[in-house]
Image: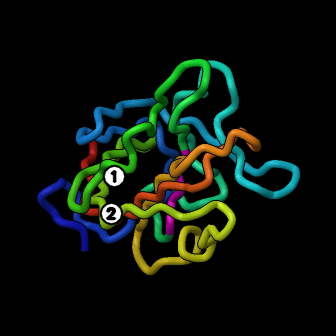
Amino acid sequence: AVASAYGLSTAVLPAARPVTITIPAINVSSPVSSVGLNPEHTMEVPHPGPRYDQPAWYRYSPTPGELGPSVIVGHVDSAKNGPSVFFALGALEPGQRIDIARTDGITAAFEVDSVASFPKDSFPTRVIYGDTDYAALRLITCGGSFDKKTGNYRNNIVVFAHLAGAVKA
């Protein structure tokens, strides 16, 4: 069960879209948009424009606090504007907090379990997106070295977290 010290005592929350994400340890406080799938069935990322530097919830994953892995992606940087919203994501450490305010007025409080870097050419899809028996969160950005030929980073940084509590506004 979720620690009642946060206000609500429940192991999972009902569905409600994320509105904002706050990660105090890396000074992130941002609205959250949403993404779906590209035509080739890869996950979209925030497109250039006003929401480029905002993280986005993958709308085919559970909402934050629901049973299973809720997935939020964000850019690490851009050639034009430098660091982006998840620039320091890889610096997170176990035990640090991620708060996600939702449309139902509940803020889901997650605790970081681990941070890992995976080569994009051997990305562990099942580990990231596969079912869990708890309310999980996955934050994903690019990392590793930059491949000038493809214009992409070679790795993905993934933060694994679990629901530690919830507060009703």
- Residue position for label 1: 108
- What residue is drawn where x is 81% and y is 58%? 41
Check if residue 71 falls in the magenta segment.
yes
Task: Return the residue found at the far right.
Answer: 39
- What residue is drawn where x is 57% and y is 35%? 33
Neighbor class of circle 1 (other Cα within 10 Å; few <14, some 14-19, many 20+) is many
Between residues 152 and 29, which one lies in front from this camera angle?
152
Neighbor class of circle 2 (other Cα within 10 Å; few <14, some 14-19, many 20+) is many
Q: Is residue 80 above or below residue 123?
A: above
Could one spot residue 78 in this view of the protein? Answer: yes
Q: Secondary structure at mark 2?
A: strand
Q: Is residue 103 left or right of residue 50?
A: left
Tell whether label 1 touches label 2 (CB within 8 Å).
Answer: yes
Question: Residue 67 location, x and y as percent?
Answer: 47, 70
Q: Is residue 142 above or below residue 33?
A: below
Q: Which residues are magenta?
A: 69-73
- What residue is drawn where x is 18% and y is 66%? 3
- Residue position for label 2: 163
Give the number of marks: 2
Could one spot residue 13 in this view of the protein? Answer: no
Q: Is residue 125 left or right of residue 44?
A: left
The amino acid marked with disc number 2 is Leu
Which quadrant holds the C terminus? Answer: top left
